[in-house]
Amino acid sequence: MARQTGERREPTFGGGGGRRSDGGLRAEARDRPGGPPSTPKRRPPAPKRPKGTKKRPRRSLIGRLVRGTIYWGFVLAIWGAIAVAAVIGYFAATMPPIDEFSVPKRPPNVQIVSETGDLIANRGDTGGERIPLAQMPKFLPEAVVSIEDRRFYDHMGIDPIGLARAFVTNLRAGSTVQGGSTLTQQLAKNLFLEPDRTIQRKLQEVVLSIRLEAKYSKDEILDMYLNRVYLGAGAYGVDAAARRYFGKSARDLNLPESAMIAGLLKAPSKYAPTRDADLAAQRAAVVLGAMREENYITDAQLKDALAHPAKPVSRELVASGGYVADWVMDQLPSFAGALNGDVIVETTIDSALQKTAEATLRKGLDTDGKKYGVTQGAVVILDGNGAVKALVGGRDYTTSQYNRAVTAKRQPGSAFKPFVYLTAVEHGMTPSSTVVDQPVSIGGWSPENYEHRYLGAIPLARALALSLNTVSVQLVQRFGPQAVIDTAHRLGIVSQIQPNASIALGTSEVTPLELTSAYVPFSNGGFGVVPHVIRRITSSDGKTVIYERQSGGSRQVVQPQYVGEMNAMMSQVILAGTGQRARIKGWPAAGKSGTSQAYRDAWFVGFTGYFTTGVWLGNDDGTPTKKMTGGTLPAKIWGELMTGIHQGMQVAELPGAQAAQEAAANAAAQVPVDDTGAAMPGAPGQVQAQNGPRWSAIG
């Protein structure tokens, strides 16, 4: 390669020759961006519009805003849907897998029935049995679908159309008047979720609804919903609501009743017919209208249903047997253990006797309660085996669920004296044995008879008929308090009894149930019994027997001859003594009245050859009555009740009837008739302790 020689030549910038003082590095105009200014070119003229055409109007600002809003709204809706789907997908991914998804079991229902299968009550968390959808009247699910989820059979668990419709409706109304949740969503919420109003819970509800729809058929979902949904007044499920509001099974609901129950779903407390019958009827009319719009019913059916609205039953009818049901539930765990499903408890209760007992007690309190200053009562009826045929624990179960028949311990007064007299006859005395009615003083305590009268030497039978306190106390002193306590416990008293002389006047407290059961050996020939109400427990389909009471096992607690002697004396109480108001025309009967200290409690307990019945009256707070004795209102209620339940039955004699008739014949002419319950030997009187407490000496 040729090698260049000579002076090196540097490049120059610009058009001048030679080297410039700035080194030739100064940029000139043509070196700047854009180059030298050029002469602007003239824009070519716009083409001319053809003749006859109008100038195109420019879009208005409002038009552009509307068009932009629609466009961007559509875009945002798409992205919003994507976002919601993503969030739902996230919650779905974080929840348990589908194979672990299961519907929790419905809480067990306990169906309590009488000895003939009549329903007494449902107990448990639901208050009603589970009824398959196929066994419900078709109006019931149709009414629910019509008013709550018209597209139930078309959507997949969530209903976008329904949500949009609810949104528009609420927007127009300015408040929330329509919900967008489907029945499936409501079921999912009730089964799995807490009632929180959060976005997270709502999204979980959506996911669970879709899962429910994937796993169960529409009818299965509707079945679960109708058997679990809350319908007010403590009723869960349509059967509980049907029994609560209409006193019948959900299987037997008619069209107006079905519409009224469906109407409760919007607001159970607000539309409950027991709270506001008119409002419930108005809501039912709305449901009927929706059913007509969906063509579930005809115009004629709509017209007839509106003309004959549902009539809820009274609480009294619904509550009948509530005391029995509560007592059964208290005992159930010891017989059946933990329940894994619905069960049926068959009881010994006679429905007719139960209703008669309730009605008679309420009538007596309504008629004479104010007169005697008494507000409460209890009734127990047992047969000769100790089976409870009726049990009423108070005046009105709806206002007080306290079971006085089973739980309340009260002083029995002279109703305890048969155990004193039985102790005497078991130690050799007889109804004709002579006792002396005279003043008694024990350690400064001097029990007295009514009006301080004493009859002197009298037969033992007459002393019991007149309920003489001094004689009873002398018998306790003669044979010892412990002997009397042993006798009472042997016959069925389970409460503790204080070993002192005052037990002669019934100062140790007992319950109506135990006192009545302790009288049963007098009516069945001397056999001890255990009062019982549960006969059998089975699964709801009846295929599995969980418990069944075995008969037999009773033991003789009183010898037959002593039973006859006691019945001879106790018959006189009704025939010619303090319990004459308890007479049953044409029927042999025996019993004993009793009144506690200061007239706080009044009793009559007695029996026939079929039933033993106890009646207690008093006030829950222990305030004294207006000098009511066992021979007045309690004996009257007992007589009316026993007369009613023995109608149509064949007359049965008491054990030892012959001895009873002879004793009654001997004493009848000597004993005055207690027509007024006023002054007579053995009627109520105060006994004054000498330098000691006052005691009521009551017959």
Image (cartoon, rainbow, N blue to C red):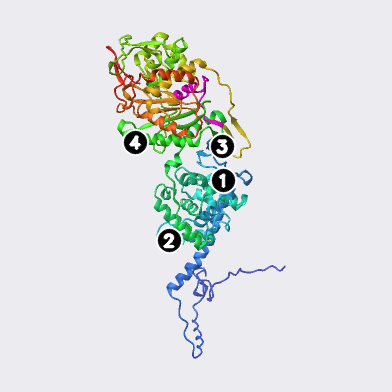
Q: Which residues are magenta?
A: 513-535
| Residue at image point 58% right, 58% down | 154
Label 2 to label 3, Cα distance in Å?
Answer: 50 Å
Quarter of the picture containing the N terminus is: bottom right
Location of residue 337 with respect to 226 vertically, above or below: above
Q: Amino acid at mark 1?
A: Ile
Residue 337 seen in the figure:
no
Q: On the image, numbered disc 4 is attached to which residue?
A: 367
Specify the label residue 348 is tagged with.
none
- Under circle 1, the secondary element is loop
Binning the other alpha carbons within 10 Å of mark 3 as few (below 14), some (14 to 19) or many (20 upward) gives: many
Q: Tell me the CA gap for discs 4 and 3.
A: 38 Å
Quarter placement of the C terminus: top left
Residue 330 lies, in percent from the top left, at 49, 30
- Residue ID at (50%, 48%): 201
Disc ID at residue 131: 1
Vertical order, 138 against 478 (above or below): below
Residue count near mark 2 (Cα–Cα under 10 Å), binned few <14, some 14–19, many ≥20 = few
Camera-side mark, 4 or 3: 4
Q: Which is closer to the viewer, label 4 or label 1? A: 4
